Structure formats: structure tokens, C-alpha cells
Image (cartoon, coloured by chain):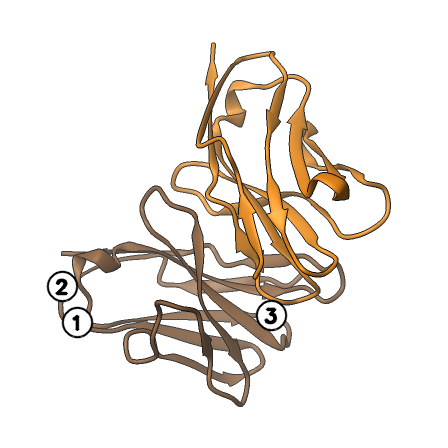
Chain colours: A brown, B orange
Amino acid sequence: SAVISQKPSRDICQRGTSLTIQCQVDSQVTMMFWYRQQPGQSLTLIATANQGSEATYESGFVIDKFPISRPNLTFSTLTVSNMSPEDSSIYLCSVANSRDYGYTFGSGTRLTVV
Amino acid sequence: AQSVTQPDIHITVSEGASLELRCNYSYGATPYLFWYVQSPGQGLQLLLKYFSGDTLVQGIKGFEAEFKRSQSSFNLRKPSVHWSDAAEYFCAVGNAGNMLTFGGGTRLMVKP
């Protein structure tokens, strides 16, 4: 299975600022997924990032708020823009493992907006 | 659209008792089904997955799950719960590299 390095692991940010989260995968993958886990909640898909094309966003998530970059097949970033306390969540990236049909998740970024 | 329902938000069992966590899914194609566990402040750990073959799947930590197509269910079981099993459990459905859809989660508490 792929191994994902996700950074930062946690951050405390001021409202109105932006934070960029990075995920580096140790192998080439076609699709990367970004999820949000609000406090005490389940995981919700934000968007699917394909290399060479714009990310596909789920209902309720927009590119201006959560811009995503996917410059190559091993790397992606998610930016949380113009943050408010409601953005305080854990953000996770994930990839599908083609060999075993499983999924690997990054360790998550715990974001607190004050 | 795919969806996953975990009917039980909280479950409390005594240590040593058996456990069953329910999961029902809606999916238009052949589902790939997963159970993950998340301990407080920790990341997601895969317990087991199913995508074909034997409908009774064995996972880590003594967990198993049974896929029942007729009931659209994939319930997680453990014959004897340990205090260290207290955590949040998530059922998820996907297919061959596409996005995973997660259920709302079940929080398991274990009484001594």
C-alpha cells in the first residue's frame, strides 16, 4: 500500500488567514481525495484531485474556499482560505491503492481557528 | 448516489461481551466495503475490507464482518470485547479507486 506524508499535523490559525496542507505519496496515484472531519463527526469528502485537471468538488464545497493543487502524481495541496472558527476540523488526504483495492489515509491535519 | 448508514451512534458493552456494529449501505454497483477504527486523537486504522469472495471477512484485532447483499448490510462483530476496543468505528463504501463514502460512525464504550 502507498504511504502518505501529510503536513502539518496540527496548526492554530487566526481567522481570516489561510492554511495550506500538503500530502506527499511514495508512489504515483491517479486520484487523491481530500476529506474533512468536523469535531465529533464523520468524514466528508471535500474534493477529488486528478493530476492535470481541476479538482472535482462535492456539494457544499467550493474552489474559492478550498483551492487544491495537483502538480504531479505524488503530491497535492489543499488550502483552507479566509478561515473562520467553523473551519476548525481535521483534514485528511487519501489515495486508492490499486493493488489491494484499499485506501491509505494521511495522518490528518488538526486545524483550530481562533 | 452512494450512502452508508450506521444506525447506532453510541454503543456500550461490558468487557468480555460480544459486539455487533451495524452498517447498511446504498450503492449502485458492486460495493467495496470497509470498516475503520479511530481512537481519540488518532488517525484512521483499517480493520477489514470486502470486495469479493467469501462474504465473511476476517480483520485485525479479532474483528470480522459479514457482507449480506440481500440486506445491503456489512455488520462488524467481535466475540469478546476488550477495554482497548473503545473507539469510534466507521463503515465506508466505495468502488475500485473511487471516493469512499463514510457512515456517521458508532462510538463504542466498554464497561469494566
Category of crowding for the residue at label 3, using alpha-carbon neighbours closer than 10 angstroms: few (below 14), some (14–19), many (at least 20):
few
Residue drawn at x 62%, y 25% is B20
Q: Amino acid at mark 2?
A: Gln
Which numbered disc, 3 or 2, marks the residue that appears first in the sequence? 2
Q: Amino acid at mark 1?
A: Thr
Category of crowding for the residue at label 1, using alpha-carbon neighbours closer than 10 angstroms: few (below 14), some (14–19), many (at least 20):
few
Tell me the quarter of the picture where residue A88 sits. Answer: bottom left
> Do badges 1 and 3 share one subunit?
yes
| Mark 3, residue position | A26
**Residue B62 location (% of width, % of height):** 69, 28
Q: Quadrant of the N terminus of chain A?
A: bottom right
Image position of B98 with respect to B57: above or below: below
| Mark 2, residue position | A14
Residue drawn at x 35%, y 67% is A60
**Residue B78 location (% of width, % of height):** 66, 24
| Mark 1, residue position | A17
CA gap, disc 3 to disc 2? 32 Å
